[in-house]
Image: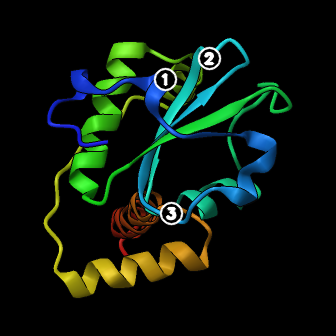
Amino acid sequence: MNITHPRDFDLSALPSLAILACRQLPPLPAVYFVLDGARTIHYIGQTKDLTRRWTSPYRGLGAFDVTTGHIAWLPMEDREQRLGFESWCIKRYDPPLNRRHRSSHAPRRHVSLTLTTEVYARLEALADAHATSVHAQLRAIVTEAVSRQSLGD
């Protein structure tokens, strides 16, 4: 499916699988949608590897009934495009599990960074080693560095 604008996509035309069959998901970068049996969107996310995202121990679905749930996905290679499309879809569909994740965190300031390919690759390796995202790994590194600086280390 070729998307030129987010409003052009048709959720019902996307490939999907039962959550319980997540090991059959393709290992590709995508924006994904967690749906219930009535095809209501409960969560929207993006990943560089759909299989890995859904076969890892943490899924963050809380009390969502995975026995009737499905994952629909839109393959998307470009990371910036995935992030933008995910953000647009979250704003448009306002899924309840995305709201839960927003409200469970303290208010934050957002910072934009430009990293060299080498630094980003090292962050990816650290994130993979700690089973977390690059974003979470970078946040942990910065938080720790600022804490040490505040203590005079």
Q: Nearer the viewer, residue 101 or 81?
A: 81
- Place of residue 132 in the rendered image (x, y in percent of width and height, measured from the top left): 56, 63
What amino acid is labelled 1 in the image?
A: Ser
* Residue annotated with mark 3: 49
Which image quadrant for residue 18?
Answer: top right
Characterize the local packing of mark 3: few (<14), some (14-19) or many (20 or more) Cα atoms within 10 angstroms.
some
Q: Residue at x 47, y 82 (%)?
A: 125
- Place of residue 119 in the rendered image (x, y in percent of width and height, measured from the top left): 26, 83
- Place of residue 55 in the rendered image (x, y in percent of width and height, measured from the top left): 72, 59
Tell me the CA gap for discs 3 and 1.
Answer: 22 Å
Quarter of the image containing the C terminus? bottom left
In the picture, measured across the screen, residue 48 lies left or right of residue 6, that is right
Characterize the local packing of mark 2: few (<14), some (14-19) or many (20 or more) Cα atoms within 10 angstroms.
some
Q: Residue at x 20, y 82 (%)?
A: 117
- Place of residue 85 in the rendered image (x, y in percent of width and height, measured from the top left): 28, 36
Q: Is residue 108 visible?
A: yes
In the picture, measured across the screen, residue 25 lies left or right of residue 113, that is right
* Residue annotated with mark 1: 12
Determine whether label 1 and label 2 are within 8 Å by CB.
Answer: yes
Q: Residue at x 60, y 31 (%)?
A: 34
Tell me the CA gap for discs 1 and 2.
Answer: 9 Å
Is label 3 or label 1 in front?
1
**Marker disc for residue 39:** 2
Is label 2 or label 3 in front?
2
